[in-house]
Amino acid sequence: MTTLRWLRRPGVWAVTSALLLGGFAFAGSSAAETGDASTQPAAVRIARAPGDDNSCDPLATVAPSTSDGGLDVQRIIARGKLVAGIDTNSYLWGFRDPNSGGIQGFDIDLVHALAGAILGDPNKVTLLAVPTDQRIPALQSGLVDVVVRTFTHNCAREKQVSFSSDYFETGQQILVPKDSKVTGLNASIKGQRICTAKGSTAEGLLQTSAYKSQEVAVENQLDCLVLMQLGQVDATITDGALAAGLNAQDKSLRIVPGTLDTEYYAVAVKLGSRDLVARINAVLQSYIADGDWQRSYGQWIKPITGQNSAPPAAHYTG
Amino acid sequence: MPSQRGRQDRGPGAGGLTARLTATPPRRLQSGAVLLALLTLLFGVLTVWQVSSRSAAADNVVNHSQPLSNDAAQIFRSLADADTTAATGFLQAGQETAAVRTQYNDDIATASQLLTKAAAQSGSDDPGQQWITKLNAELPVYAGLVETAKADDRQGIPLGGAYLRYASGQMQNQMLNEAQSLYQAETDRLNSDYADARSLPWAALGLGVILLVVLVRAQIRLFRSTNRVFNLGMVFATACATVALLWLAVGQSLASSYLADSDTKGAAPLQMLNQAEIEALKCRAAENLNLVARGSTTAYETAWTTDSVQLAGKDGYLAQAGSMTSEDATAHQAVSAATASFQNWQSRHDTAHDANQNGDYSAAVNDTIGSGSNTIDAAFTSLKGSLDTAAAHEQGQFTSLADSGRGATSLLAPGAGVLAVLAAAGVVTGVNRRVAEYR
């Protein structure tokens, strides 16, 4: 049975019989992104980030209030948790210690202070890691109550979200290897490969600069450090505060002295949440007055920059 | 055949040789016999040549191109697995388990060994060679990046995660594409060897039919001119030629049929299963890297969505593997089990994703890389196990069917050669008898 199985295989009979029948018959018959960069005055130092329309005073904010009566504050109190959009990749600002698993940094201290004041317990927080380009959508959709994530307060963004009083002053800076000849955004940087984060202030700044050369845009400023270590870029431009964080991770780099502009970080909330902004401003006021701001600065930032600093003074508009 | 009159007309004008070969009836008979014997031998030579080249192609399928294609798939798998495992080890941070570290090291070692082997087995003009060279150069660089990532992570700085994402980017966007190209090049060669081995030897078959026609016609003519019905030599020659032609037709179509089956019931589903496993590894890597990225990008969530549809969507690799194995209970069951495992995986993935969305990163990491019976890891391991079972079965099917195919023609070439020689001898002997009668 097995030996004859091949007889049942398809094709075998067809080809064979056709050939033979045909053969004998034959024989038989016997035939054959950051678009709207403003034009900066040439004489003075750039006072606003590109992408900003200069239409507002970024230091202006709602007068502080300790009232918990507002709708937005009440929602947080009813939930019993403050949901904060943060970064876990910015060394010194908001980062996860891989060994302990804890999230820490200057921004994180501020989040805990907000929860402590509003809810009475600094640990009543939910920390949500939010990508850079998701900061505004996360607020708009109500995914988070606040964004405390080295978020620059500028006029263009004021049309999409509301900002608290500014809690940190910084400016774009250039990070280079120690032996680099770069002295600033001038002729010395011409021809160098410069890394910036996509959609960042630095990217816009570079676009409008006369000294822009070979830009390399990456998703996150941290990726610039990888590329610098691998020798694929020669310089990185990013917020001075973040540059300090990068420098802290690689001591063979240096930050070129001087900033390219002035920027302020603020806490962002959903557009129009005046009561929450007022409440946050009150927290910031006491956070600064009680010396918590300086304590946090001394713990995270000062050891790296070696410089003293103070929070910018707010312009309360009532 | 030209008529008697035509030959006479042409005789004087054609000159010496033709005239001498056809001068007398016995001469004519002898010349005809020589031509017929030569035709028979030509059939033998053509058959031996065509059958041998097909056997060589079939040998190539079994001994060369299928193993190379399978090795290329294994290189692809090892690289994808290394990327996935590196991310798992990274997420375990300081507590990286010995099992994970061993698996990663094995993946790198396997990929490296197979690349060396593939380089040795394919010539310099081989289309896969360029990919082998590139992968050989990139593999140590990748391994170095992964080690840097781990070292940075142990220092407690976020740079480690960025390094791992960079390393994974090199793997996903460059090395895996090259491994895919290598796999494609080897599979193309397998298919071309298959086509060579399966093509029917039409020239030999055609000449065989012509030979039979000529033999039968010659006997009819001989009968008419000598009034003897059977010429034993010619009958023997006809029998030999018939057997040779039959053997050729049956053997070669049988081989072709077996080889076709070894492809559709072995090699082709095996390729689909390989694709499915690689896609599953990509899904797993995306899931791990999303946690490594710690919210710095949404790219990995997008990658999970795309890759999981490619794996288990309506026209995904699992569905295709399911329909390709629909007539094979063992393989089909294994594919169904793999599909069920993926559904478990998907629901556990959603749970982990929700935990991460709600800010519970530790729970998300535990759900994703933790061990235990109801974890993502368990679902993924069981999916991989089912795919491996199905793949081993298909590999067995391939080998047995391809061996049957090769067996069907193993004696054909020498056999047909001997039969052709015998037939030629029969023709000459048979005609010489008649020629002798003229003396």
Image (cartoon, rainbow, N blue to C red):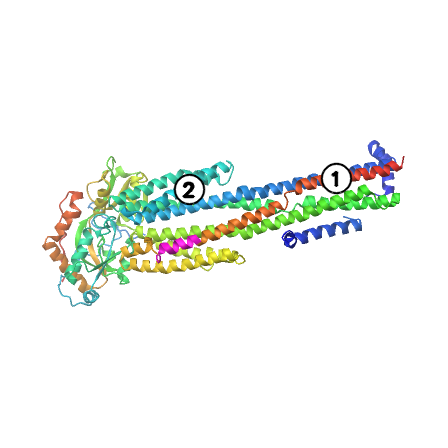
Depth check: give the residue in front, A246 or B419.
B419
Q: Residue B35 at x, y = what percent?
A: 78, 38
> Magenta part of the protein: which range?
B373-385
Q: Residue A261 at x, y = what percent?
A: 21, 47
**Distance in Å between CA atoms under marks 1 and 2:** 54 Å
Q: Is residue B260 left or right of residue A289?
A: right
Q: Is residue A210 visible?
A: no
In the image, residue B39 sits, relative to residue B255, either above or below, namely above
Q: Residue furthest top?
A: B16
Residue drawn at the location 17% of the way across and 51% of the way down:
A168
Cβ atoms at labels 1 and 2 below 8 Å apart: no
Residue type, mark 1 in image: Leu
Report helix, strand or loop for mark 2: helix
- Whichever of callouts 1 and 2 sits on the residue coming sooner in the sequence is 2
Where's the N terminus of chain B, which quadrant?
top right
Asked if the stretch drawn in magenta spans residue B335, the answer is: no
Q: Is residue A143 left or right of residue B85?
A: left
